[in-house]
Amino acid sequence: MGFLDRVTEFFNRSDETPAVRPGRNDRCWCGSGKKYKLCHLREDEKKQKSYVSCGKS
């Protein structure tokens, strides 16, 4: 991901989980600057499990 992509992502960020999750060692989608595994990984996995158990995709 290049500099321009990161700047664009920063200004277009939202509080919603993106459709494609980043890799564990990528920067988090929320724009905090932390690695995804230390920031939103657990929360996103919980959301995904609740969608699967409800039959939603």
Image: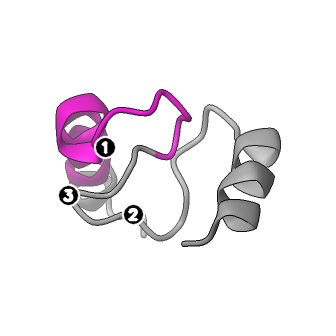
Magenta span includes 28: no
User: Is 40 left or right of 15, judged from the image as shown?
Assistant: left
Instruction: Give the x, y percent position of residue 24.
Output: 20, 57
Q: Which residue in the protein does label 1 denote?
A: 44
Q: Which residues, given as a range, are shown in magenta?
A: 29-49
Image quadrant in which the C terminus is located = bottom left
Q: Nearer the viewer, mark 3 or mark 1?
A: 3
- The residue where tag 3 is placed is 24
The amino acid type found where label 1 is placed reads Asp
Side of 11 relative to 15 (left or right): right
Residue displayed at 28% across by 30% down: 39
Residue type at the position of mark 2: Arg
- Residue farthest toward the front in the current orientation of the protein: 3
**Whether label 2 touches label 3, CB < 8 Å:** no
SS at circle 3: loop
Q: Residue 45 location, x and y as percent? A: 21, 47
Which of the two labelled residues, at mark 3 and mark 1, occupies the earlier sequence position?
Answer: 3
Give the Cα distance between marks 3 and 1: 12 Å
CB within 8 Å, label 1 to label 2: yes
Main SS of the magenta part reads: helix
What residue is shown with label 2? 21
Q: Position of residue 56 (x, y in %)?
A: 41, 63
